[in-house]
Image (spheres, helix red, strand yellow):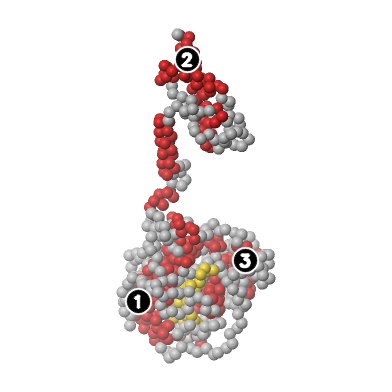
Amino acid sequence: MYTELPFDELKVDPTQKKRIAYFYDADIGNYAYGAGHPMKPHRIRMAHSLIMNYGLYKKMEIYRAKPATKQEMCQFHTDEYIDFISRVNPDNLDLFTKEQIKFNVGDDCPVFDGLFEYCGISGGGSMEGAARLNRGKCDIAINYAGGLHHAKKSEASGFCYLNDIVLGIIELLRYHPRVLYIDIDVHHGDGVEEAFYTTDRVMTCSFHKYGEFFPGTGELRDIGVGKGKYHAVNVPLRDGIDDATYKSIFEPVISKIIEWYQPSAIVLQCGGDSLSGDRLGCFNLSMNGHANCINFVKSFNIPMMVVGGGGYTMRNVARTWAYESGLLNNVKLPDELPYNEYYEYYGPDYKLDVRSSNMFNQNSPEFLDKILTNIIANLENTKHAPSVQMNEVPNDPEDLGDIEEDTAMAIDTKGGSEMSRDAQIQPDNEFYEDDEKDKGEKAIVDNKQEEQDSMNIDKNETPVVEKNKEIVEDKQQDENENTDDKIEEDKPEETNPVEEKAPEEKVEEVKPVEEKAEEVKEVEEKVEELKEVDKPEVTPTEPTKESKQEDQPMEDATKLTEEELKEIEELNKGS
């Protein structure tokens, strides 16, 4: 029986420690599907920037997975399809006209530069995350570059070319008898369901928009066939579902599935297109409503792999994945965003929040009660979780450890290990712990002031520079007014550039002759002394700015003294 559950504030238990392996490749943001395409891998780089600047790197182990090879990709996909993906590029499309039609490549799934490398990063992170779960080296693995759940065995679909989720589950099945797959993307996870539709070792559960909506699959009565019957659960939803309604259908379904199926590992696809305001989505979930699903699944303390997925409003996806990464680490991140290289994307509020809108919720309690009753009835048709015959676990590839060395096994055809080549490259968006001094979790600056400063970058002078300039000018003016006539005290050798590169004291301008008419004799003596001073010689090295500034008053003083001399001579003639 469906019951509306209150949506309370999310809670975490700081005492509960989880070992988390976080997979990220800095190259993922360099790939682009094309101008105007809604899928933008750059959102993963934005999420990573928030995760780092919030200081979550201190709580996780961060890895760059080795890209999946063609052989590893072919564990699920056909050889012909993977060979096509590895060879096609924008320059040779004319040579693969038939293959583009056959493999559904060209429209929603365009060919772009680095397509195969992009697939390798996505698949490598999910496979390595699953392998670390198998070896007991972590409790939770995160790969936001994964989650491409639409890709089929020999066909691209829905912006997805390589189904990294299926490859990760295949790796998990080497050790785990039963794996549960949960999908909260707004689109049905058809690629994963199709891959395991006939087996009872993987149970799939998808919460999605159903109807005239891509991909058009995921009906309530699609429950699997053969041995996989009752091992596919679909929860078709309508537009506008909000946090409380989603929680009221999600938690009972997942609780019942875990109670009955007893999985030993969980894969959670957390596509961000189910958030409110998504470019392609039609749900009305806030960031907290979306994150509640991750927090609830984590509470079962089952080894879990978290992957990305859809999400086409980049700033919302980045904020949500960063917030959920904090929950996985039992940390509630503060609302104030730390300054980062993508800070301007999050205006005008600059908060870690995605709010629901006033969109109408078309999911009535009667509709949801029918869905929940049907799902529970299907699960009760089988009285126990499926058993798996004991088999010898296939041999793992040799575990070389987490540190790659320049050994014969580590060196590839490019002439060195991946680690040694990475050491020669400094990505523009790399994060270092020293960055926290200015823009990390311990030094969150005033957001409004930072925004104003960023707007003044292109101007000739910033307000700070202008202020400093005024201070220097005022100080120099005070020195000119308060300093006595120092020309009498200066010695000729003090202006010699051979002995000193820059004099310590500036030669001040001589006062006008009208103010000193009664001191004519003293002025004549000063003029004679100045004439005897040798002019500074030009040194081979370029003078410093300080020496240029200090030489200028000497030239002005000499010029004024000559004018003064002429006036004195006229006075003498007149007398």
Q: Residue at x 45, y 16 (%)?
A: 520
Rendering coords of residue 178 (x, y %): 50, 84
Tags 2 and 1 in contact by the CB under 8 Å rule? no
Dot 2 falls on a residue whose secondary structure is helix
Q: Which residue is mark 2?
A: 568
Q: Residue at x 31, y 74 (%)?
A: 6
Q: Residue at x 56, y 22 (%)?
A: 532
Q: Residues within 10 Å of mark 2 (few under 14, many from 20)?
A: some
Dot 1 falls on a residue whose secondary structure is helix
The disc at residue 418 is 3
| Nearest to N terminus: mark 2 or mark 3 | 3
85 relative to 314 in the view: left or right: right
| Nearest to N terminus: mark 2 or mark 1 | 1
| Residue 559 seen by the camera | yes
Q: Which kind of residue does numbered mark 1 sit on?
A: Ser
427 relative to 362 in the view: left or right: right
Q: Residue at x 45, y 74 (%)?
A: 18
Front residue of 192/409: it is 409
The relative height of residue 427 versus residue 246 in the rendered view (above or below) is: above
Viewer-nearest of discs 1 and 3: 3
Rendering coords of residue 338 (x, y %): 42, 59
Rendering coords of residue 319 (x, y %): 42, 64
Dot 3 falls on a residue whose secondary structure is helix
| Residue 169 seen by the camera | no
Viewer-nearest of discs 2 and 1: 2
Q: Which residue is mark 1?
A: 248
Quarter of the image where the C terminus is located: top left
The disc at residue 421 is none
